Image (cartoon, rainbow, N blue to C red):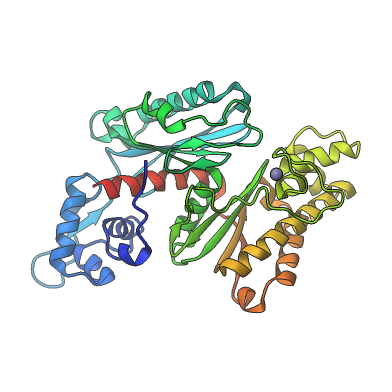
Amino acid sequence: MTIDDAPRDALRGGPRELLRWVATGAAVSRADLSRLSGLSPSTVSQRVEALINQGLLEETGAGRSRGGRRPRQLAVPTGGAVVGAIDLGAHHARVGTLDLSGRVVQARTLPVRIEDGPEAVLGALLAEVTTLVGDDPVASADGSAADALRGIGIGIPGPVQHATGRIVSPSRMPGWNGFDVAAFCAGRVDVPVIVDNDANLMALGAHRTAHSELDHAVYIKAGTGIGSGVISSGRLHRGAQGSAGDISHCRVMADPAPPCTCGNAGCLEAVASGAALVTALRGQGVPVSDLTGVIRLIDDGDRQATALARQAGRAVGEILAVVVNFFNPQVVAIGGRLADCEPLLASMRATLYERCLPLATQTLLIERVAAGQDVGITGAAHLVIDHVVAAA
Ligand SMILES: [Zn+2]
């Protein structure tokens, strides 16, 4: 379950980086890899051979010759190997298969009733992954589809103890506290299963697809709940237990301070999450049933909903300002369903500039996460690919 989280310097020219250069098209030959990594041709050859033997790289005929023998081109196999990915949300799950370069091959969204409990929900989602792998053109390109599955990455909308894959005190997930996701899955599938929280998966997916050249980044996931994932020195920063980036129960200024599911009052989650906006609007007599309804009201310019969205944006900005001053990232990006909510984004941005040191915001990029609905499964797939490469 644990992943070799070596610092980025130690990864320079490591198998994962070699694979990534080929996957992104930055390198098509051993010579390219040698140039990019600064490693000797013989070291590169050795590592490439190991990756080919593991089925993680393949050779695809001849490249262009610069005199002498034409070099063979390297590629990430597009047949015979896939990873499964599950991005579990409060009401829906995105399930997919991706190839070893992290490209989505198949994906679908399924309705989920989280209150049905972990066995029922995860059992159904694992079965869905198996079905997708069976139907997968990439997986079945090279023999048996079942053998093609290299691992499954799962994102959970609550705190996950990274070393064990166990869920610890989640909000709005009745019956899931203490559940050992990794052990449950190990009894059902015969491949490595890696579990992390949904914000970390969004961070990894967004970083690998949009910001892989940046070393320090913070990604906020603002949907029904609220959380963040941190990329430090190019890698996901989980902290000692896996709770790094969990900003949901940080205290913000709010009067009155609304009660939180954790037992405290005035937590960010109780003020700025989608669930909090639904509760607050209902409290004001607005008949809204879910986050979709709230977003519709905000888009329509409803006065009460817009005021709450601004308050939520200020609260997120307040916490982010502390994070930015403390951590000094190059980019802060917001994703999740509330990321398209303009009043929230505007007041978050204003608060951030107001409360941060000029040096911290001088070159800071503040963006929306651009990778769309597959960002979570993309992150989940990269977790698995990194694990497979490290194991190789
Ligand atoms: Zn709380």
Residue 154 seen in the figure: yes
**Residue 365: in sight, yes or no?**
no
The image position of residue 143, as x and y in percent, is 23, 30
Task: Give percent across and percent down for residue 170.
Answer: 61, 36
Q: Quadrant of residue 281?
A: top right
Quadrant in the rendering for residue 83: top left
Query: Which residue lies at the image location 53% right of the left edge and 62% below the top edge?
Result: 217
Q: Position of residue 379 (x, y in %)?
A: 46, 47
Query: 364 above or below 209?
Result: below
Q: Quadrant of residue 296?
A: top right
Left or right, 63 with reference to 390 = left
Regarding ligand 1, which quadrant of the image does it lie in?
Answer: top right
Q: Residue at x 41, y 25 (%)?
A: 131
Query: Compared to 115, does 316 lie above or below?
Result: below
Viewer-closest of 352 and 126: 352
Image check: 117 left or right of 276? left
The residue at 75%/61% (across/down) is 346
Q: How many marks?
A: 0
Question: Farthest residue in the left direction?
Answer: 68
In this rendering, is residue 69 above or below 147?
below
Q: Residue furthest right?
A: 285
Which residue is at 53% across, 57% downward? 230
2 lies left or right of 95: left
Residue 368: x and y in percent read 62, 57
Instruction: Please tell me whether residue 176 is drawn above or below residue 332 in the rendered image.
Output: above
> Which quarter of the image is occupied by the N terminus?
top left
Camera-side residue of 170 and 126: 170
